Image (cartoon, helix red, strand yellow):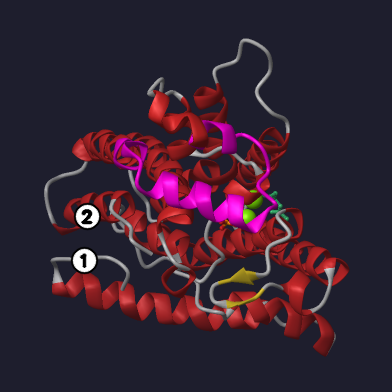
């Protein structure tokens, strides 16, 4: 389990449950032709962290009937939606590597990658329909937020708009929204009180955004052997992320070269390596990590609606794990 859970009973339940979700996900990747089944299974089974399904299951534990079958269905819905969005994301980012494997666009082509994303999104919509009209409404809203976050990333901040605020809005949309919905589904279908559903959803939004912020920090800090991706991808594309935005606020003359390199696409390999090296050694990296730790503290405050116990502790450690991710 990608989470230090102190309670052995809870841990056993989650591990068993995730194994079941894994079987269901493998089933849902199968289409009418071998072509689509192979392309859909490719990324789904390349070894994701299953962060969103885990949050669905954990949030469900805060309710009166965490074992409800709808909880499993919701866990599949969020992972299918997530993986669908990754197929599209890798096309837009022209990424070659994901989860240590070739991306679908690299292994096949953009057409296969886009259609496979659409297929998985269709699958997740079918399952959402099984969850009833409330879930359909939530799913539709989440989908809009995901896409709007992604669109905002491609349109730079307007004149007079704070780039950091713009970036945080992008992150809340493209990542926070689906993770907030994961927590909401878990609490809803696990039978938690309305007050708990709202609190866990707000918690999910913060933890979700933090997950992306950590991801962006790792994009600079880690090597592809640990991340399974190509380091410095955002930098190469000229997509500003938290450490970059924090470094750009520097007025230290020693940062002149770094500031000159940042903020434009770095297609030249030696310039890219130079910027990556300068950023890795810059205090903005630590500043960014501290910002994320502050977010975890805020998320944990929202858990005060829950009685103290193993579920609350696990959700607290989930928030901490996200803020201190190293892979
Ligand atoms: C990863 O960000 C991308 C996302 C979290 C969501 C992208 C959303 C869409 C493509 C629109 C939704 C489409 C469908 C079919 C649901 P990243 O590129 O910063 O992270 P990475 O390092 O993991 O690539
Ligand atoms: Mg990407
Ligand atoms: Mg992207």
Residue 84 in sight from this viewpoint: yes
Residue 183 in sight from this viewpoint: no
Q: 51 or 254, which lies in front?
A: 254
Q: 171 or 249, which lies in front?
A: 249
Q: Which x, y percent locates residue 285?
A: 35, 42
* Relative height, residue 315 to residue 305 (above, below): below
Q: Quickly name the residue at label 2.
A: 317
Left or right: 218 with respect to 193? right
Q: Which x, y percent locates residue 110?
A: 84, 66
* Relative height, residue 167 to residue 207 (above, below): above
Per the rendered image, the range of residues in magenta is 258-287
* Relative height, residue 138 to residue 36 (above, below): above
| Within-10-Å neighbours for mark 2: few <14, some 14–19, many 20+ | some
Q: Quadrant of residue 238?
A: top right
Q: Quickly name the residue at label 1.
A: 4
Q: Which x, y percent locates residue 90?
A: 69, 61
């Amino acid at each position: 389990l990608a989470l230090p859970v102190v309670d052995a009973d809870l841990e056993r339940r989650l591990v068993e449950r995730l194994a079941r979700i894994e079987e269901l996900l493998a089933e849902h990747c199968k289409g009418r032709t071998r072509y689509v089944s192979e392309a859909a299974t490719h990324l789904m089974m390349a070894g994701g962290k299953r962060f969103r399904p885990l949050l669905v299951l954990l949030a469900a534990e805060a309710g009166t009937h965490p074992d409800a079958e709808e909880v499993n269905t919701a866990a599949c819905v969020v992972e299918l939606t997530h993986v669908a969005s990754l197929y599209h994301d890798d096309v837009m980012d022209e990424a070659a590597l994901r989860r240590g494997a070739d991306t679908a666009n690299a292994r096949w082509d953009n057409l296969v990658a886009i259609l496979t994303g659409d297929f998985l999104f269709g699958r997740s919509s079918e399952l959402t329909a099984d969850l009833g009209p409330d879930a359909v409404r939530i799913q539709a809203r989440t989908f809009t937020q995901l896409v709007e976050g992604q669109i905002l990333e491609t349109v730079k901040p307007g004149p007079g708009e704070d780039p950091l605020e713009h970036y945080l809005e992008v992150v809340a949309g493209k990542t926070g929204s689906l993770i907030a919905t994961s927590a909401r589904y878990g609490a809803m279908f696990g039978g938690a009180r309305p007050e708990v559903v709202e609190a866990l959803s707000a918690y999910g939004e913060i933890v979700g955004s933090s997950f992306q912020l950590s991801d962006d920090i790792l994009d600079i800090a880690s090597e592809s052997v640990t991340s399974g991706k190509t380091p410095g991808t955002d930098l190469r594309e000229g997509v500003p992320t938290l450490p970059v935005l924090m470094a750009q606020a520097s007025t230290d003359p020693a940062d002149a070269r770094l500031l000159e390199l940042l903020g434009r696409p770095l297609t030249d390999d030696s310039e890219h390596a130079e910027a990556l090296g300068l950023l890795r050694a810059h205090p903005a990296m630590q500043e960014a990590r501290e910002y994320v730790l502050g977010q975890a503290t805020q998320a944990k405050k929202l858990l005060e609606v829950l009685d103290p116990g193993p579920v609350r502790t696990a959700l607290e450690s989930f928030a901490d794990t996200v803020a201190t991710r190293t892979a």
